[in-house]
Image (cartoon, rainbow, N blue to C red):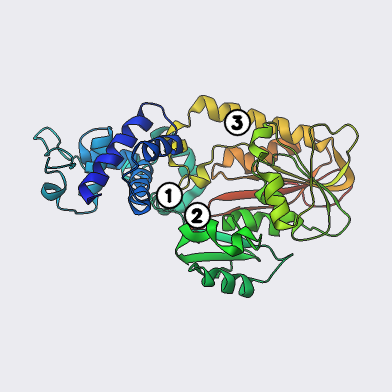
Amino acid sequence: MTPQARLSAAIEVLDRILAGSAAEQALTNWGRASRFAGSGDRHAVRDLVYDALRCKASFAALGGSETGRGLILGGARAAGQDIEALFCGQGHAPGVVLASEVATEPEGAAALDCPSWLAQPLRDSLGADFTAVMQAMRKRAPVFLRVNLAKTTRSEAMAVLAADGVIAQVSDLASACLIVLENPRKINASSAYLEGLVELQDASSQAVIDTLDLHNGQRVLDFCCGGGGKALAMAAKAQISLEAHDRDPRRMRDLRARAERAGARLKIVESFSKTKPYDLILTDVPCSGSGSWRRDPQGKWALTEARLTEVLAIQAQILDQTAAMLAPDGVLAYATCSMLAAENEAQIAAFLQRHSGWTCKMQRRFSPLSGADGFFVAQLLPPQSGGISGS
């Protein structure tokens, strides 16, 4: 495919997404219908689509409309590309630019590609880092790997990856972390991945697990397991009795295979009446996802005030539910991939107000300015376990 044809394909996919299709599904459907497109073409179209979604507000202003064409035109203008050569109307190229497709300089929240209704809450939450963080969220996220230290070392994993053309180096953001420098798209077919030596996992997600005091013999529950990345990270750190739960079991459909590949032992559970109490419960709760907008840019624009209110209630409910399942000397860990104080510090403060005698052992934010996703983690202790309230 020519560069112009790739732009036309991205416009087609973006129009489907703007009409309500999920981004991944729209890209998959286009790929299946476009057998002429090679792997390089599919990757290029995917990059164009995701770049446009990350920068939807600013590209729409620069392109003259919030349409697939407007976003791709705006992106080309933002990159300083030769518009006449790309939008020439010849062959499979997009049509020539019309006089009505005038570029407008984006301002305010649009210039930062931040949803306007969230700009002030994020500014309040991030303080002086607001602008820099929003700029970072407009760019593609780095690719991080977690080395399975139960099977290998970081240096050995890097060597195995390099043999398959994947070049990585040690990242100091987490104890088992690598950052991929070259050929990230070869990871899933690499022997290091297929043999369970590495897993794709953001550095901040790994760092959350590093904050947990894991030791042999603990009874541990990953309550909001999802795909199971954090459960596998915990299993690699100690010989624990690990159980995994998610209210939507479909999210865990690949977990058994991933655990087998990693050599991890865990049990998927639906009921807790016979299994509680636990020494450690991790609640990686549903959230706005604002810390991972680079990876899910469609979610940034889909989030509404009503959905955020709903999520805040779900978070509080999960904390209350899991608090009752904790052993007297246990730890309740709360995590989000959010940058909003309402989902983080304020949620912990509200829990402590509802539960007399509970204390906060620690709470920490992980900033996207480090290169990884925005995350938050807090550890709560039941009465008489020590700790500093609201620390």
In space, the residues marked 3 and 2 are separated at their CA atoms by 22 Å
In space, the residues marked 1 and 3 are separated at their CA atoms by 22 Å
Is residue 107 visible to the viewer in this orientation of the structure? Answer: no
Foreground residue among 5 and 380: 5
Judging by the rendered image, the residue that carries numbered circle 2 is 368
Element under disc 1: loop
The residue positioned 15% from the left and 35% from the top of the image is 101
Disc number for residue 311: 3
Q: Are marks 1 and 3 in contact (CB under 8 Å)?
A: no
Residue 241's x, y, as percent?
85, 50
Q: What amino acid does circle 1 point to?
A: Met
Crowding at label 2, few (<14), some or many (≥20) Cα neighbours within 10 Å? many
Crowding at label 3, few (<14), some or many (≥20) Cα neighbours within 10 Å? some
Looking at marks 1 and 3 on the same chain, the residue that comes earlier in the sequence is marked by 1
Foreground residue among 339 and 139: 139
Residue 207's x, y, as percent?
64, 58
